[in-house]
Amino acid sequence: MLEFSRSRAIERAALAQLLRTVGEGETVTYAELDRAAGTGVRAERHLLTAARREVRDEDGLVFEPLNLVGLRRLTQVEMATVQPDRRRQRAFRQSVIAQREMAGVREADLGAGERVQFLARLAQHGALAAIATHRATAKLAGIIAVDNPVLTVDQTLTMLREIR
C-alpha cells in the first residue's frame, strides 16, 4: 500500500511540474500529460485534479479542460472574467437544484429545531440563487467603485435588496 501511495505522489508531482511550465493561453495535451505521469491521466483523473489544485493553490495557475485535447492555462483576464462567471452559473444551478429538492420536505414532519435548520438552509439557497444571477452581477459591478472596490456591510445589504 505504501508503494502505491508513493508512486501516485510521484506521478502527481510530475504532472504539477509539467503544468508549471505551460505559458498563459497555451495548451498541454493529454498525450503530454500521460507521458509526464507515466500513466493515462484520463483514467486516473484524481492525479490530474490533485496536480491542478496544487498549481492553483501554490502558483495561482488555473487551467480549463479542452474536451479530448488537454488543458489550457487561462490568462489573467480569463481568470478574472470567464472563470468566475462559470462558477457563478454553477452556484446558481446548484442553489436552484437544492431548492427544488427541499420543496418536497413536509415541514409538519419536522421537529422545531429541524424546522429552523431547514428554513435557514432554504433561505441560504434562495439568497445564493438571487445573488448568483447575471443581473445581480451586473448591478454589483455598477455599485462597486473602481478606486475603492470594497463594499461596506450596509452597501452590500442595500445591493441585495435592490436585486429583486
Image: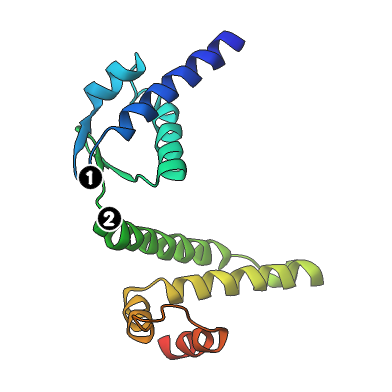
Q: Let me know if residue 1 appears in the view.
A: no
Q: Which corner quadrant holds the C terminus?
A: bottom left
Identity of the residue drawn at 35% across and 44% down: 61
Label disc, if present, on residue 76 of the rendered structure: 2
Q: Which corner quadrant holds the N terminus?
A: top right
Quarter residue 53 falls in: top left
Q: Is 86 in front, or is 6?
A: 6
Q: Is 155 in front, or is 134?
A: 155
Residue 54 in picture, x, y percent from top left: 45, 37
Image-based side of 9 in relation to 14, left or right: right
Establish if 65 lies above or below 134: above
Identity of the residue drawn at 52% across and 62% down: 98
Colouring scheme applied when the structure was drawn:
rainbow
Residue tagged by mark 1?
Answer: 24
Label disc, if present, on residue 44 of the rendered structure: none
Q: How far apart are labels 1 and 2 at the CA level?
A: 8 Å
Is there CB contact under 8 Å for labels 1 and 2?
Answer: yes
**Amino acid type, residue under disc 2 in the picture:** Gln
Residue 91 in picture, x, y percent from top left: 43, 62
Establish if 142 lies above or below 117: below
Which comes before the other along the chain, label 1 or label 2? 1
Q: Is 140 in front, or is 19?
A: 19
**Amino acid type, residue under disc 1 in the picture:** Glu
Q: Secondary structure at mark 1?
A: loop
Establish if 16 lies above or below 141: above
Residue 4 in picture, x, y percent from top left: 54, 12
